[in-house]
Image (cartoon, rainbow, N blue to C red):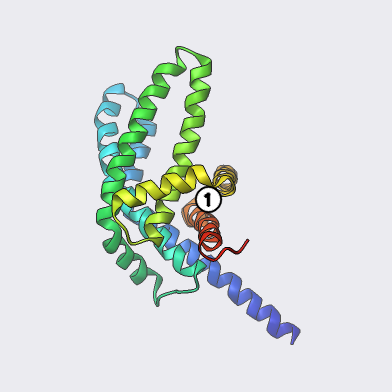
Amino acid sequence: MKNSGFINGMYMVSEWVMRFSVINLLWLFFNLPILFIAASMFFADQLSYLYILLPLFILLLPVLFFPATAAMFASVRDWVMAKEKTGLIISYWTYYRENYKKGLLGGLFLTAVWGVWAVDYYYFSEKNIILMFAFVIIGVVLFVYTINFFSVIAHYNMSLRAILKNTLLITIGSPLLFITVMIGSGIIFLMSSRVWFLMPFFSWSILAFISFSAFYRLYLKLTTGNS
């Protein structure tokens, strides 16, 4: 009996490891052009290269990053709600196609917002340290909002305007969800920087799982009244 329990436990662990790694690798695959450009920007030795690569990087965010991340959150949603479909690759591709338009349009909006934030942060960080810290706080809120956007788009079938509105409401209206996403993301990114070789296999999929789990707990609390 003990051996049977141990084997079952090892099987469950290996199954979850496979889920996280497969989804994370799929996400990386769909974002390969962005990763290539980001690496090229990092190793660029001339400023002129950045002027060419940065617009391409920004352009590809709504086209590739947002739809791919929305598909990852939708796949994780199946795990959290125990509604898994057969085949991780097939389900990911299905969600990618289903959510592509909303992911693209939402990505255009959020990329523009992030662009405005980046320009303002760069400008005011050299002018006033208080304003710099203010924009750091705004950046944290915007990051949590972006993560919550993926949870909302994965769970609800509604217009993009409603998705953006509901994302704002849960971001500013649920301190527990906000703190969970913020701290969970910080821990994952810190661990990824220390154990960097695990990043391609687990980082973003685990972040999606933690974030959507917290979001779904809030959803159940609001819809059923359970604590």
93 sits left or right of 85 in the view: left
The N terminus lies in which quarter of the figure? bottom right
Residue 225 image-quadrant placement: bottom right
Q: Is residue 221 above or below residue 141?
A: below
Report the residue that reaches farthest toward the bottom: 1
> Label 1 belongs to which residue?
197
76 sits left or right of 97 in the view: right
Nearest the eye: 175 or 200: 175
Nearest the eye: 153 or 40: 153
Report the residue that reaches farthest toward the top: 127
Residue 81 is situated, as x and y percent measured from the top left of the image, at 49, 70
Q: Residue at x 39, y 33 (%)?
A: 42
Give SS at disc 1.
Answer: helix
Residue 197 is situated, as x and y percent measured from the top left of the image, at 53, 50
Q: Circle 1: is it few (<14), some (14-19), or many (20+) Cα within 10 Å?
A: few
Residue 85 is situated, as x and y percent measured from the top left of the image, at 40, 75
The amino acid marked with disc number 1 is Phe
Nearest the eye: 161 or 152: 161
Q: Residue at x 30, y 59 (%)?
A: 99
Q: Is residue 26 above or below residue 136?
A: below
